[in-house]
Image (cartoon, rainbow, N blue to C red):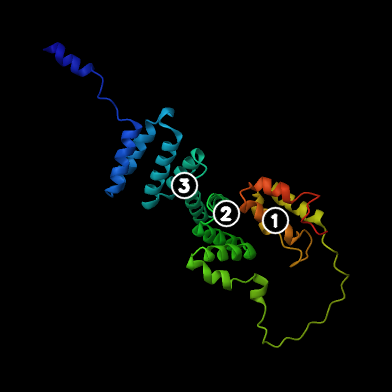
Amino acid sequence: MSAVILALFVAPPARAESFQAWSARASRQEREKDDSAAESSYANALSVWKPSDGKTARSKAFCSRANLRDRRGDEAGALADLTDCLALNKKNAKAYHRRGQLRFKQGQVSSSIDDYYHATALNEHFGAAYLDRGRAYEKQGDVGFAKEDYARACGLGVKEACPNAKGLLPAEAAAAPPKSAPRTPPKAPDLPPRRTPRFKDCLTALQSCIDTGAAFSTCVGKSSACERKPVNGCCPGACLWSFRKRLNGGDSEAAAFRETFSASATCASH
């Protein structure tokens, strides 16, 4: 009898549940609205994951746990899980969009714009991503890009974006007095003629911005269109829009910048 008892103590434990079993349990608990238990089950699933279980399944588990963490207010945990999810599956437009929203809330506006670009590149009909990207551009002060994104979102049926698509004005236009208000033209000051902006000054200004560690889209977004505001370091509007078009077409920021802002760029008018 003592030998039997000893055998019970030294016998291996019952077979640990597999990644698939824990994931299935977590999915069931989600359906039953037991978020706490589901989050714990996803954690167990991820802890026993093996390469043979597949990267796609692991990515799905990270994204599912991110949703649960997000719902209970753990934004940092949700952000970490979304990043792990996207590292395994770079074609999840919804995950890019949600990570962009979380980054925007944390003040990472430029990073959020990058995520929204990924989301719209994967799904060109993703109206909510265009709306949120418009908000991010507006936060950066880039009214032109913001208005374009609001208009795109509105066209895709996101009614919330429509008022901004119609009513958003550049800062200088909003500050101008109404047309009906009487204005006395100011006397022109005796200044030397304005030097025509040069494209190489645009390239120099952009490179200086990038050298600080800022993202390509951030530096381009800060640039003034020479046609609207011909200041030193401004860039041709055609080049600014060409950069944006390449991003919408799925190019990376680095590739879009390299192709648009070169010394021989066809978009440069001077």
Which is in the foreground here, disc 2 or disc 3?
2
Q: In the image shown, does 163 or 139 lie closer to the viewer?
A: 163
CA gap between label 1 and label 3 equals: 31 Å
Label located before the other in sequence (2 or 1): 2
The residue to which callout 2 is attached is 113
- Which amino acid is tagged 2? Ile
Locate residue 42: give its quadrant. Answer: top left
Residue that numbered label 1 is attached to: 242
Mark 2 and mark 3 lie on one chain; the one further toward the N terminus is 3
Circle 3: residue type: Leu
Label drawn at residue 125: none
Lower sequence index among marks 1 and 3: 3
Q: Dot 3, how many residues are within 10 Å of its Cα: few (below 14), some (14-19), or many (20+)?
A: many
Q: Residue at x 36, y 38 (%)?
A: 43
Quarter containing the N terminus: top left
Q: CA distance from mark 2 to mark 1?
A: 17 Å
User: Residue 23's spot in the image, x, y percent?
Assistant: 34, 38
